[in-house]
Amino acid sequence: METNEAERQRWNDERWAALWPRRERLTDAVTAIVLDAAAPRPGERVLDVGCGGGKTSLAAARAVGPEGTVVGADLSAPLSALATRRAREAGAENVTFCVLDMQTGTVGGEPFDLALSQFGVMFFDEPVTAFANIRAHLKPGGRIVFACWQAAERNPWFFAPSLAELLPPPPAPAPGKSATGPFALADTERTTQILRSAGFHDVGWDTHERSVEAPPDSVVDDAQLTFMGVPADELAVAQTAVEEHMRQFVLSPTLSRFPLAFLVFHATNI
């Protein structure tokens, strides 16, 4: 079985990728927090893991300056294309993007000073293997900083439970694999053990909570319901269930306030 097969299919679906700029409106406020924790320095070489549309990569590229470099790696070809286009439009010459699964893939060139990620590391089906591979890309003394979600119950914007009766349960992981998804690293003890097993030291984390105002379709829209597998004859029922769930966040017909609860982990390669 190919590594991260289900995630590879999902993130390379053009329909999913087309929705991505809407989703970024929910998490753009986190970028400054991740960069503050990562503290990229002028001249450093930075790896952005699961870079998505490249916004965090571009922010890191500004921080390291023209003497530094940033490589954004993501298994999604359409999102990497979006990131490349954004870099070109911004005139950012010190950042490049590659289609690569960081669970097993290798980024060429010199080792990195820093690996960072904004909600891009929860989708490894062999997390110890993945983080060990990321660590192998770091210099001695190099550091990793990433944001991941706290538990689903701490993030009520996550609407999937309201559709539980309309969607089949996710399949159990194959032997030797771990469940993936946005909340896969929410257990701090388990994530700490994953990082230590991967060879990292000085593992720690900080908890964060933020409220973000964004249009309602930053979280869910009809296209996403269809993509998730809601049958056409159940779409109206799903829409009603989601509307009822999302009503708690509404500020106006075009704006909602969503509470975000996430973790920022940090560790060192010795």
Image: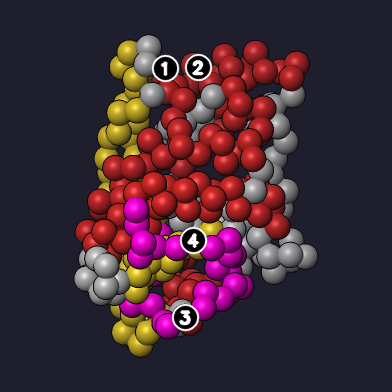
Which image quadrant is residue 116 in? Answer: bottom left
Q: Indicate the amino acid at tag 4.
A: Phe
Dot placed on the residue nearer the N-terminal end, 4 or 3: 4
Q: Which mark is residue 97?
A: 4
Q: Position of residue 185 (x, y in %)?
A: 47, 58
Q: Which residue is mark 1?
A: 247
Dot placed on the residue nearer the N-terminal end, 2 or 4: 4
Q: Out of 132 and 45, give the one closest to the viewer.
A: 45
Q: Which residue is mark 3?
A: 109
Secondary structure, mark 2, is helix
* Residue 101 magenta-highlighted: yes
The answer for how far apart the CA atoms under marks 2 and 3 are is 48 Å
Labels 4 and 3 touching (C-beta < 8 A): no
Which residues lie in the magenta part?
91-117
Secondary structure, mark 1, is helix
Q: Out of 121 and 169, give the one closest to the viewer.
A: 121
Q: Position of residue 17 (x, y in %)?
A: 57, 41
Labels 3 and 1 touching (C-beta < 8 A): no
Task: Tell me the mark number nearer the camera, choosing from 2 and 4.
Answer: 4
Labels 2 and 1 touching (C-beta < 8 A): yes
Q: Which residue is mark 2?
A: 243
Q: Position of residue 79 (x, y in %)?
A: 54, 48
Task: Tell me the mark number nearer the camera, choosing from 1 and 4.
Answer: 4
Residue 28 in sight from this viewpoint: yes
Q: Indicate the amino acid at tag 2.
A: Glu
The answer for how far apart the CA atoms under marks 3 and 1 are is 49 Å
Q: Residues within 10 Å of mark 3 (few under 14, many from 20)?
A: few
Which image quadrant is residue 163 in? Answer: top right
